Amino acid sequence: MFGKMISAFVRSATTRFISAKDGNVAVIFAIALLPVLGIVGAAIDYTRASAARSAIQAALDSTALMISRDATADPTISADQVQALATKYFNALYHNKDVTEVTPVATFSPNSSSAGSTVTITGSGTMQTDFMRVVNIPTMDVGASSQTAWGNVRMRVAMVLDNTGSMADDGKMPALQTAAKNLIDQLSKLAKQPGDVYVSIIPFAKDVNVGKSNYNQSWVNWSGQSDTWDENNGSCSGGSSYKNKSDCTSAYACSKSQYTNKNKCTSKGGTWQAANYTWTPDKHSSWNGCVTDRDQDYDTQKTAPVAGDTSTPSTLFPAEQYNACPTEITPLSNDWSSLKAGIDAMTPSGGTNQVIGMAWGWLSLLSSDPLNAPAKDSNYTYRDAIIVLTDGENTQDRWPAYGNGSKQNNCGANTPCIDARQATLCDNIKAVIDPKLNQPQYTIYTIQVSTGGGSSAVQPTLQACASSPDKFYMLTESNQIISAFDSIGTSLSQLRLAK
């Protein structure tokens, strides 16, 4: 009887609740609020988890690099010692408060005859959720891993640095010199043994300076075209008024030597005739070391020069007595003092030809003429990088029709001539695939510096040349050059991380 009374009461109360209209909105809002809070809260919890994961990853990466340094210094290091170091370094580096209990686990593979050393470090922990617990998810697992290899991964870096006249403005050259030397310090610390890291310095303007001591090298082209060295540096038997071979050897003179004008000559009974003057090139030892762009399309390729190549186009590098010849390049080296001295010697002068700078940056990484970088050891893998910094658009190269030093001209509709050469060169560099890693062999970083009253528009060709969007830097202050190079140094150190 009592049960029936309770049942009747519940049915009656339920009917009244369902039929009641007062407070329905509040009830519905209360019911809907739970999933809304869950969704909004999930975003907050996931943001916290992402930040924790990034902190774990950064600490693991640094820990792996520090262990590689210690293991290189002590080849007898054991797996237990590696684990102890991993715990020590990670705990000193990791400070995220949302995931506090993270234990790094290190797996160490020592160097063998067939492979270098590797260490893989993983770390994971649990984060207490603030909002997702409402939908019965009280915790989230957070983790990351890092692996570094040493003894079998080496690095080669070409720094292609603008030395044009505008680099004298706004403190750009001093900032560049500081930044480049700081990067040398960063890279030198990555070298655990001789040969691990090499760097080249390629100052450029319209030309590059390969060093006047190379005047007897077979890869230098002295003659054969109207713009080559022998045709433009010498003396004419007809006098100093003839500045090049063409003017000298094509000159006419009067049979009556006192007359130098054709009309005057013939009116006085003289004969206007070929002068037969002789052009004598200067000694090649007086060359200042500058070379201009190679014949197209070798100007955008890595083709090794062929000694004595007299064909057209030629694979040789045309010598030029450029009056704004930049500082001599420093070929690939691990002599850190010599590299810094080359940077300190840079002075701004001349027009902008990013193409020739990049071309020689590429050539400096090759184990062939003209620069003959140290041969790569097949027991190692290599990470090659090219860093290009410029403060201005291309304005001048070997071909006068392309630009006059102040601005470049178009070749076709809205196609800047020198930029077109640069785009081809960049594509050719990025097309090279490392057979061991099955990925692009070269990582390209590009830096545009636009200070003062210069154009702040991004140079699309330079931007597109970078290997990825994050490897292009747009700077508007000279002091940003230092931070950009520091960022690149950090990125290069990450190239030593296997994954």
Image (tube, rainbow, N blue to C red):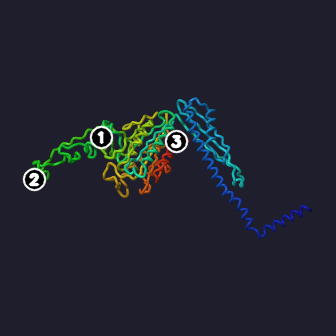
Give the secondary structure at mark 2.
Answer: helix
Q: CA distance from mark 3 to mark 2?
A: 77 Å
Residue 411 can be seen in this image: no
Residue 227, relative to residue 190: is it above or below? below
* Marker disc for residue 287: 1
Q: Amino acid at mark 1?
A: Trp
Q: Nearer the viewer, residue 5 or 169?
A: 169
Q: Quadrant of the N terminus?
A: bottom right
Q: Quadrant of the C terminus?
A: top right
Say few, some or many: other residues with alpha carbon within 10 Å of mark 2 (under 14 / 14 to 19 / 20 or more): some
Tag nearer the camera, 2 or 1: 1
Q: Amino acid at mark 3?
A: Ser
Q: Amino acid at mark 2?
A: Thr
Q: Nearer the viewer, residue 329 or 380?
A: 329
Residue 393 can be seen in this image: yes
Q: State which tag comes first along the sequence, 3 or 2.
A: 2
Q: State which tag comes first along the sequence, 3 or 1.
A: 1
* Image spot of residue 92 (x, y percent): 62, 41
Residue 6's quadrant in the figure? bottom right
427 relative to 403 in the view: left or right: right
Tag nearer the camera, 3 or 1: 1
* Image spot of residue 220 (x, y percent): 31, 39
Instruction: Name the outermost residue toward the right.
Output: 1
Q: CA distance from mark 2 to mark 1?
A: 42 Å
Q: Give the residue at mark 2.
A: 266
Q: CA distance from mark 3 to mark 1?
A: 40 Å
* Marker disc for residue 493: 3
* Image spot of residue 369 (x, y percent): 37, 37
Q: How many numbered circles are shown?
A: 3
